[in-house]
Amino acid sequence: MLNFLVTFIPRAIMQGIPLLYGSTGEILTEKSGNLNLGIPGIMYMGAISSVIGAFYYETFTPKGGMNPFLGVLIPLVCCLIGSLLTGLLYCFLTVSLRANQNVTGLAITTFGVGFANFFGGSLIKLSNAEVPAIVLGGTSGFIKTTLPFADKTGWFGQVFLSYGFLAYLAIVIALVCSYVLKRTRTGLHLRAVGESPATADAAGINVVKYKYVATCVGSMIAGLGGLYYVLDYSNGIWSHNAFGDRGWLAIALVIFTIWRPSVSILASILFGGLYILYLYIPTGTEMAIKEIYKMFPYVITLLVLIVVSLRKKREDQPPMSLGLPYFREER
């Protein structure tokens, strides 16, 4: 049993880290009243932007001459820029032009996935790879670097210390976001904008500013999930539709955690474990059964949504203005 847990828990954590980035970014966005269903596309944008940066750095750097600092910094900066630009596009359409948030989010997702697959396919052709994939082993090696004493602490090191810095960064970001939302004046203003933008505006809070900043920061956080999955979890391998449906799972995680970033830490590990559970349950060659196991996170999310709706506690509900455009003229 211990051997199973030591093997299963690290994989569940690594599978859950992209979900944690995505859900933390979406929680921050939704607290401002913006429902960003473009999170899956933004995670793809973050992933492909980091892949492009890493690809050209590895291509134009002499073999063996890669600098570890630049090897991490370049894909990280490219990821943040790509995610930020996508978040700004969403804000411009929904906040400035007051477009429908649901439609805009779905359009952003379609655009992000298409953009990533197009440029990913272009890089594959440029690399003249024998298989339809890009392998960025050098960059991945820098990002996956673990603590030097992790291998010397037995099962404890394997379960808690055997991850790259991005895994721990995801936990830190979630805790910081939780603290900001609950304990700071900025968090109070942001929650006020999400609950009643007209009231917040009347109190002198810049509604547009808070919506833009929260959505853009949330997009950059979510984009890091794409970077982590490709350059850490997948060992730097990019292929067509590399990220799968994990962006939607991150949105489901937001509902499951009832808009609490700190709860997302453990919940993301749970979702990550459920997502790969089919690998550890004997199913033979029955692919349909494996797909049913993959449904577990979504089924649990639906159950939580039903329970929360029946309890009708205000603190468990989404922001009141979530998904609604703000017209200052109607205040």
Image (spheres, rainbow, N blue to C red):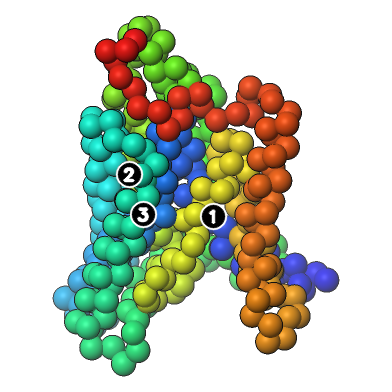
Q: Are marks 2 and 1 in contact (CB under 8 Å)?
A: no
Q: Are marks 1 and 3 in contact (CB under 8 Å)?
A: no
Is 31 left or right of 310, judged from the image as shown? left
Depth order, front residue of 53/280: 280
Q: Mark 2 or mark 3, which is nearer the start of the sequence?
A: 2
Q: Which residue is mark 3?
A: 109
Label 3 sits on a secondary structure element that is helix
Q: Which residue is mark 2?
A: 104
Label 2 sits on a secondary structure element that is helix
Residue at x 62% of width, y 41% of height: 257
Q: Are marks 3 and 2 in contact (CB under 8 Å)?
A: no
Farthest residue toward the bottom? 130
Say what amino acid the circle numbered 1 marks: Leu
Q: Mark 1 or mark 2, which is nearer the start of the sequence?
A: 2
Residue 52 visible in the picture: yes
Depth order, front residue of 258/217: 258
Where on the picture, by quarter, is residue 260?
A: top right
Question: In the rendering, at what x and y percent does residue 265 appear?
Answer: 60, 47
Q: Nearer the viewer, mark 1 or mark 3?
A: 3
Say what amino acid the circle numbered 2 marks: Thr
Q: Which residue is mark 1?
A: 249
Structural crowding at the residue carrying mark 2, measured as other residues with C-alpha within 10 Å and reported as few (<14), some (14–19) or many (≥20): many
Structural crowding at the residue carrying mark 1, measured as other residues with C-alpha within 10 Å and reported as few (<14), some (14–19) or many (≥20): many
Question: In the rendering, at what x and y percent does residue 264 appear?
Answer: 59, 44
Say what amino acid the circle numbered 3 marks: Thr
Q: CA distance from mark 1 to mark 3?
A: 13 Å
Is 329 left or right of 274, judged from the image as shown? left
Residue at x 37% of width, y 76% of height: 239
